[in-house]
Amino acid sequence: MRPSVRVVSHGLACPLGLTTDTAVAALHAGIRPLVESERILDGAGEPARGFMLGRLPEDAPRIERALTLAGFALTEACAPLAAERSGAVPCFLALPEPGRGPLIELPRVERALAEVVRGATGGLGLEIGPRRVFPRGRAGALLALQAAVSALMRGEHAVALVGGLDSQVDLVTLQALADGGHLLCRRNRDGLLPGEGAAFVLLANPRAVGADRAIAHITACAVATEPNPRGQGGPSQATGLTAVFHELRSQHPGRVDVVVSGQTGESGYERGFSYAYLRNATLMPEPLRTLVLGARLGDTGAAAGAMALVAAIAGLRPPRALPWRAPRAATALVHAESDDGTVGGCIVVR
């Protein structure tokens, strides 16, 4: 399948900013709003650090933090739907993998996001449902993207939302990360910095929405599984990521201009990318140009894939404040891998 669906709009919210433009500008400026938690200690006995939204209290629960950020991102993404007065928008959603931190309950998420959409559009409904939910962590939004693209190309919907939301800095999840030895600290130089965020994109069937309304196009999607995720069961050879890049290469002629990763920045993922990059060098930018969100925003969990997608789309066009500037890139490769070995990727074209 060679998907080519239109990207109509997007929204992103994180500790760097509550709109795409502010967050991406701060991202590229290198701003890193690290916060220390005196209530959780890392592996070296020091306050745990993470990227946290300051307007929320430190003891706010995971679901409250994630839904607060999702409200801003979804409102921004739904702006083109404000003229619609009836119907419901399907939403394909990434949620956290079970097993680390409190569960983010789907019924509460559905109610909260539906209320946001009603308020942003003047009354439209939102349809999620279990079949459109992907509790697969970082790569979940890319699985959701593939499902949404397939549904749009089959003509099942005129438009669809794809997104992800998560927080890894609530006290319970932060403590679980500390207990598991996952946090970056003096005794663990290869740990991660947790973060939080949410992102959504509004996609459209090309037969339903004119090209003049598109800000980008999704031209290829791929998913795979890494048999030894995080080195469990044997050394990881980046089999899954290699397969994703190979599939994208088969669908995209030539090189992309930039690679945007939803990964954490841990050395295992960096090594895996090196393997997959060398096996698919003809797809990659020359010279290599990458943006690893985990190094700038921390590990945003189930929001990571969607945030990487929005960051890539935003990088395909100049900032609104500088309309005379030439776009920074014409094509981008987006990828992410979850702790369970789920890998996803896509190609975005201006």
Image (cartoon, grey):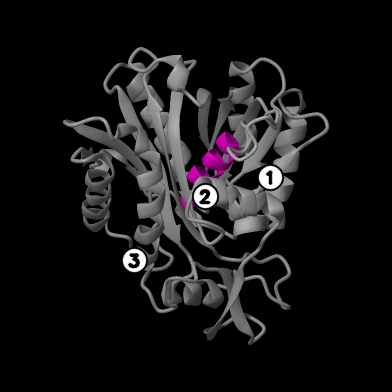
Q: Which residue is mark 1?
A: 291
Q: Is residue 16 above or below residue 263?
A: below
Q: Position of residue 25 (x, y in %)?
A: 63, 49
In the figure, residue 334 lies in which quadrant? top right
Q: Is residue 14 left or right of residue 118?
A: right
Taking the spot 52% from the left edge, 46% from the top edge, the residue there is: 20
- Pick whichever of labels 3 and 2 is earlier in the sequence: 3
Task: Give the alpha-carbon distance from disc 3 to disc 2, as whole Å.
Answer: 18 Å
Tell how many labels.
3
Q: Which residue is mark 3?
A: 64
Disc 1 marks a residue whose amino acid type is Leu
Q: Which residue is mark 2?
A: 304
In the figure, residue 6 lies in which quadrant? top left
Q: Is residue 54 left or right of residue 206?
A: right
Q: Nearer the viewer, mark 3 or mark 2?
A: 3
Query: Is residue 308 shown in magenta?
Result: yes
User: Closer to the camera, 14 or 226?
Assistant: 14
Q: Which residues are magenta?
A: 303-314
Taking the spot 34% from the left edge, 22% from the top edge, the residue there is: 152
Residue ranking furthest to the right:
287
Task: Give the alpha-carbon distance from disc 1 to disc 2, as whole Å.
Answer: 13 Å
